[in-house]
Image (cartoon, helix red, strand yellow):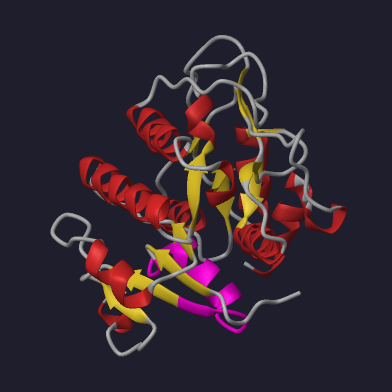
Amino acid sequence: MEEGGKKILILGGSGFIGNAIYRELRSYFDTYGTFNASRRSFEDNQQFFKFDIEEDDIFPLLEKIRPQIIISAIRGNFASQIQVHQHLVEYISENECKLMFISSANVFDAYSKYPSYENDKTLSESIYGRFKIKIENMMMRLPTDKIVILRVPMVFGSSSPRIKQIKNRIWNNEPIDVFPNLIMNVTHIDKLTQQIHFLINHNKSGIFHLGSKDLVHHDDFIREIVERIGKFSPIFKRIYTTNDDRYLAVLAKTNKLPKNLETTYQEIIDHHLSL
């Protein structure tokens, strides 16, 4: 069911998530990516285009590539990102094109009493969460079949920024932050890219929650990952933001993926055995 003729543009293709998506899709689709000026290693790659979110206009790049699918995994200045997504929405409304947006569990961070499902109302207390909601709401004005909103929890993987940060703190004997009251779900970068590949292949649209199907306390999860890294006795800094347990979890109810694409937090930890 692969459709090799499809042109895909990944905004933020040089970042951790964007580049993993690029590596997953490039053998199957005509895949392009953008890179930030600081990522010089991408300059010689013919499939990559330099794009500065604060200075460059996205329209010339869209006209040059004419993608059928745009995957937004871009990072950077929030105001610049909002402007880029306004332009994307404008382009998609006038062209045969679909927008897949990597959103976040933080669009629900004002709701702490329970996990969140696809059709729940978004509400955030954080600047980051409110920024993601703003882009989601802009997308909702497009026809439903032209949008895919991917709400993602914390993403792990052996080369992920989170794992690198934990390792650095261990090596430097610095405390590792853990949130004992936080109940969350998580994902692994390999699983996330497989799920995105599936959604493209099957021409899916709508809102998808791409996290583990079960929940775990943040401190338990991080402690178990640290155990997998090696025999260390790191310092854990326990941070309590509330007296009660609080949830930050995106679970699937209406838009479930096939069983082979589901994951558990334990499987994600087991992915780290090779660390």
Which quadrant of the rendered structure holds the C terminus?
Answer: bottom right
Foreground residue among 237 and 20: 20
Is residue 160 covered in magenta?
A: no
- Point out the residue furthest to the left here: 55
Picture quadrant of residue 2? bottom right
Residue 87 screen position, x and y as percent: 28, 51
Residue 121 screen position, x and y as percent: 56, 20
Quick check: 215 left or right of 241?
A: right
Q: Residue at x 53, y 50 (%)?
A: 146
- Point out the residue furthest to the top here: 243
In the depicted structure, whether residue 173 falls above or below residue 198: above
Foreground residue among 246 and 66: 66
Residue 127 screen position, x and y as percent: 33, 28
Is residue 21 covered in magenta?
A: yes
Q: Residue at x 44, y 40 (%)?
A: 139
Quick check: 114 left or right of 48?
A: right
Q: Residue at x 59, y 26 (%)?
A: 180
The answer to whether residue 198 is seen in the rendering is yes
Foreground residue among 103 and 191: 103
- Point out the residue furthest to the right here: 259
Foreground residue among 5 and 119: 5
Q: Which residues are magenta?
A: 13-31
Q: Residue at x 28, y 42 (%)?
A: 82
The answer to whether residue 233 is seen in the rendering is no
Residue 261 screen position, x and y as percent: 78, 56
In the depicted structure, whether residue 145 falls above or below residue 252: below
Quick check: 203 left or right of 152?
A: right
Which quadrant of the rendered structure holds the N terminus?
Answer: bottom right
- Point out the residue furthest to the front here: 94
Quick check: 28 left or right of 256?
A: left
Picture quadrant of residue 120? top right
